[in-house]
Image (tube, rainbow, N blue to C red):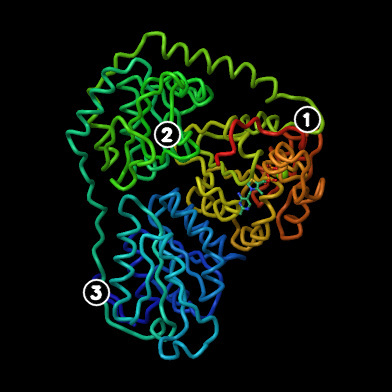
Amino acid sequence: MAASDSRIDAHGGRIAVEVARRHGVDIMWTLSGAHVFPMFDGAVTADPPMRLIDVRHEQTAVFAAEATAKLSRHPGLAVLTAGPGVTNGISAIISAHFNASPLLVVGGRAPRSRWGFGALQELDHPPLLATVTKYAGTVDEVGALGASVDDALTLANTPHRGPVFLDVPMDEFFAVAGTDLPTVRPPVAVPPDLDAIERVTGLLRAARRPVLVLGSDVWCGGAEVAARRAAEALRLPVIPSGMGRGIVPSGHDLLITSARGFALRRADLVIVAGAPLDFRLGFGIFGAQDHPAQVVHLADAADQIARHVPLDGAVSGDLTLIFDALLDARPGTDPTWIPSLREAVSATAKSDGALLSADATPIHPARIYGELRRHLADDAVVIGDGGDFVSFAGKYVEPTRPGGWLDPGPYGCLGTGLGYAMAARIARPSSQVVLLLGDGAAGFSLMDVDTLVRHRLPIVMIVGNNGIWGLEKGPMQMLYGYDVAADLQPQCRYDEVVRALGGAGEMVTDPGQIGPALSRAFAANMPYLVNAITDPAAAYPRQTLGI
Ligand SMILES: Cc1ncc(C[n+]2csc(CCOP(=O)(O)OP(=O)(O)O)c2C)c(N)n1
Ligand SMILES: [Mg+2]
């Protein structure tokens, strides 16, 4: 094997690692399988070696790669062995597809020379992944691998971002080829159409009650500074969504998260930037029934502009350029609009106060967040994986910086937790990493505490243990008057699971124990689970199931 700055003569794994590194990839998330051994050898023999983290379920590997992408804003890399390794990763690949997270998933594949013979785990993966990736294909020979990985990562990282899948037949993966190494440049920023900008400028100038929604693509596309600058210059009240949270920090006078319903009902112009107009945003229908709001959609690519609702304005392209182009469109905002929103925010804060300090036993989930808020540093990364427990967090935990909040996104797949948390620990080595888990959600990935222990990745986990699949039990009761398949073990000792795997933890049943338990958890410097027994009757007050 030989490598220079511009050319490498090596086996397939070494080639793929060298090319991926040029795209900013510095971690390989994986679980062992002989089909992908060349990738492992490529990682450990690279100079310097690429960090390789081996997990306990392929789903965790892909979720971790996705969170690496979300937090670092470089593409993530997951390496999955052929057949079941790839299929185990599919829900997480689809989550990345829904979240527009740039990701390369490299799959092993049965040898080309024996294709069709029935070799171990012989499965044609790309057709399974074609509809949920930007591209899914097989690299037929090792000589094409470097260019394929380069193209794949460029595609994954070009707005609208997303996952790309490549599988490599085992015999080709082990084979050696000479390959030119690419020079990687960031994707070209696509300028917005000026007529479309003009139209939105007109709508903004005429607006009396405007609202700006900032979604995940604003953060992922590096437009957070421009977004805040535009919001402040135009005095636009802001509702954040997904990774848009924190762009306008908690406490800012334009941040109206807790007056969201009030604002979206009364607005006369809603501008949604970097988020789909999906169920999380009432499908893009805003305002009162007799006074619908005008709607503007700003997206990072033309094919992301909503087509299911009429739009009054739409602009696609680089979100920084779009926000900057709107800087002069000062709206004629009604002078009572922002004060009325601030009043709604204060009224909610007042009524929330009682729940955040609730003394009841069993514990109300809000009390956990009342305590957590006191422990969180500005640069904390908070991750939610669960039902009602995480919805409460969305309401009560307001990030102070962008890139500090990870939720599963619109695909809503339970089980993101441990993967997202281990990636966050590595992406933000000196920040607090807090993983909020429903007790149901915990079951999908808790075994990966073993990975945290083996790789020395300390995080704080908090389980909201209500003994039920809360977000499903309530609706089933409402629809049928009874429920089945909605109960879990009451007071199950998830903290002891973590201890058995080499971490630490404790169970708390009394609200007064939560604060001290969190202090111990943050001081422990090892994976630590606070198992908080919460009130199953404290359901999240939900207006819609999003269906
Ligand atoms: C992989 C997957 N399976 C099932 C669901 C459906 N689902 C959504 S929320 C939920 C309940 C979550 O329960 P838990 O994590 O205990 O949180 P709680 O609502 O009780 O606070 C379920 C089963 C899902 N979203 N994802
Ligand atoms: Mg539960």
| Relative depth, front residue between 165 and 520 | 165
Circle 3 packing at 10 Å, graded few (<14), some (14-19), many (20+), is some
| Relative depth, front residue between 287 and 340 | 287
Label 1 vs label 3: CA separation?
Answer: 62 Å
Q: Nearer the viewer, mark 2 or mark 3?
A: 2
Horizontally, residue 31 falls left or right of residue 106, namely right
Which dot marks residue 284?
A: 2
Q: Nearer the viewer, mark 2 or mark 1?
A: 2
Give the SS element for disc 2: helix
Spot occupied by residue 325 in the image (x, y as percentages of width and height): 22, 31
Q: If you read the primary sequence from the N terminus, does the residue marked by circle 1 or circle 3 appear first?
A: 3
Residue on which disc 3 sits = 180
Q: Residue at coordinates 37% horizontally, 82% vertically from top-left?
A: 11
Label 2 vs label 1: CA separation?
Answer: 42 Å
Residue 537, quarter of picture = top right
Mark 2 residue type: Gly
Give the SS element for disc 1: helix
Residue 244, quarter of picture = top left
Q: Quadrant of the N terminus?
A: bottom left
User: In the image, ligand 2 is in what quadrant?
Assistant: top right
Mark 3 residue type: Asp
Horizontally, residue 18 falls left or right of residue 383, namely left
Residue on which disc 1 sits = 512
Q: Residue at coordinates 33% horizontally, 39% vertically from top-left?
A: 223
Q: If you read the primary sequence from the N terminus, does the residue marked by circle 2 or circle 3 appear first?
A: 3
Kindly give the residue lying farthest to the top in the view shown.
Answer: 336
Mark 1 residue type: Gly
Spot occupied by residue 21 in the image (x, y as percentages of width and height): 36, 64
Task: Please tell me whether residue 544 is drawn above or below residue 293 in the rendered image.
Answer: below
